Image (tube, helix red, strand yellow):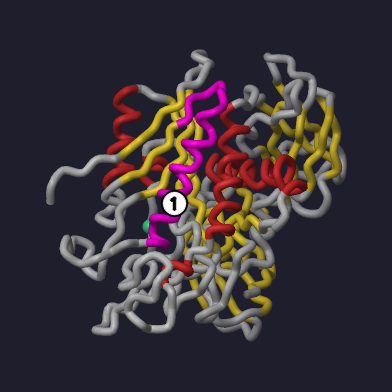
Amino acid sequence: MGRHQNVLAILPGTQTDPHEIIVIEGHMDSRCDVSCDVDCPAEGVEDNASGTALVMELARVMSQFTFNHTLVFMVTTGEEQGLVGAEAFAQFCTEEGITVKAVFNNDVIGGILCGKTASQPGCMSENAVDSTQVRLFSAGSFNSPHKSLARYTKLQYKEELLASEPVPMTITLMSPEDRTGRGGDHIPFREAGYTAIRLTSANEHGDASNGPDYHDRQHTSEDILGVDTDGDLMIDSFFVDFNYLSRNTAINATAAAMAAISPITPSITVTKFGIGKAIVEIDDPSGYGLYRVGKRLNSHDFDTLYTTSKLVDTFATGFGVPIWSAATVDEYGIESLFTPDYLATTTSIKEEVPQAIELLQNRPNPFDEATWIHFLVHQIPDYTSAVIVIRDGQGRLLKELPVQLKVGLNEVLYTHGYGASGMMTYSLVLDGQLIATKSMVFAN
Ligand SMILES: [Zn+2]
């Protein structure tokens, strides 16, 4: 097996209090059909030389600048054998008491062509091309620092980079932590309590079948770079599009740079005010004087992003029960990372006491492969079994997801997969009794 090591470059930050690191990483190993086959050629142009090239390029470019927080450019090993390298580094950070502010994991980040059996969600049909979309995977939904970092990444791209980009990119926040049945290097960091996301191309050129014709271009290839060595009329290295990879590299650079010079995150409290309004109160001991307040209704993205200079401000809630978070803005217009999520659950005296349980709209809605179903519990009733029941448009049972009620916001991930679209319903059922039903739209 030999001894394998992660390779990393450290760009020390100027700020020592607090002293935090931001990690940009991608695994450098690849694999064949059998993940411990040490003899077969597995160049892994797409998975994951693309991520390795991205990390090396950012080390080259970003080392010419100075940042408040320390940047770590890391290529890990042993990803294909079970995220071994990332786990080792996450463990090292914990043992050494290093504060990790954010991890950007880049894995399968340059391919634009859809393969035979691509990992879902992603490309829909073989040979489909997508060179303008990138997927951001992260754990959780409500109050997830990972989803918050994904939103921050998208926001910084929109505000700092988009106007000067000749080819605009679509950044899609995915509901699950990774593609169905797959995992990556961001997971050991999340498990160690650090904030981590995965960036992955929209399309992947995989062939997950393990038959005799196994030919997974994501990892293996008979071709050498730019040459059709095996004479199959396909130049495998062209599955990675270098312009697309460079656009994804810039997305990483912008988010990591902004996080590395960002001001201190405030804290907030939100209370309901009359009907359709909420009061957002910002606690900002650093006194930045300018704030962004984000409101989310039906998606992982902000529906509305307000700018205010008031520490206490009133905003329209719109329909439904929105989720709030806020950031400070410093004198250079740079945003902090956002606060944890906040739900306005305290009702004013004039309002009726809400029912014990409110079933909320799923997020995102419409959704493509997976969505989060939320419900708000004000008071836990006596019950023995609680279940979320999913039905299709004809009322046929699709799935039953058992849940444990807790006071506050409850959430459960529903994964539908691909192959159908249309209206569906989800219901909360306690001991066989229907509490509430809502519809959701499944579209792909
Ligand atoms: Zn990979």
Read off the residue under disc 1: 51
Q: Give the dominant element type of the magenta stretch: helix, strand or loop.
A: helix
Question: Left of 373 or right of it: where is 298?
Answer: right
Amino acid at circle 1: Gly
The stretch in magenta equals: 45-71
Q: Nearer the viewer, residue 226 or 333?
A: 226
Residue 385, image x and y in percent?
Answer: 46, 61
Residue 389: percent from left, percent from top: 55, 70
Residue labelled 1 has its Cβ within 8 Å of some atom of ligand 1: yes
As drawn, is 123 to the left or to the right of 220? right
Q: How many marks?
A: 1
Seen as rendered, the residue at the extreme left is: 1
Compare residues 238 and 367 and report the one nearer the observer: 238
* Residue shown at 85% from the left, 45% from the top: 276
Say whether residue 281 is magenta. Answer: no
Choose between 416 and 412: the one closer to the eye: 416
Category of crowding for the residue at label 1, using alpha-carbon neighbours closer than 10 angstroms: few (below 14), some (14–19), many (at least 20)? many
Report whether 19 appears left or right of 286: left
Residue at disc 1, secondary structure? helix
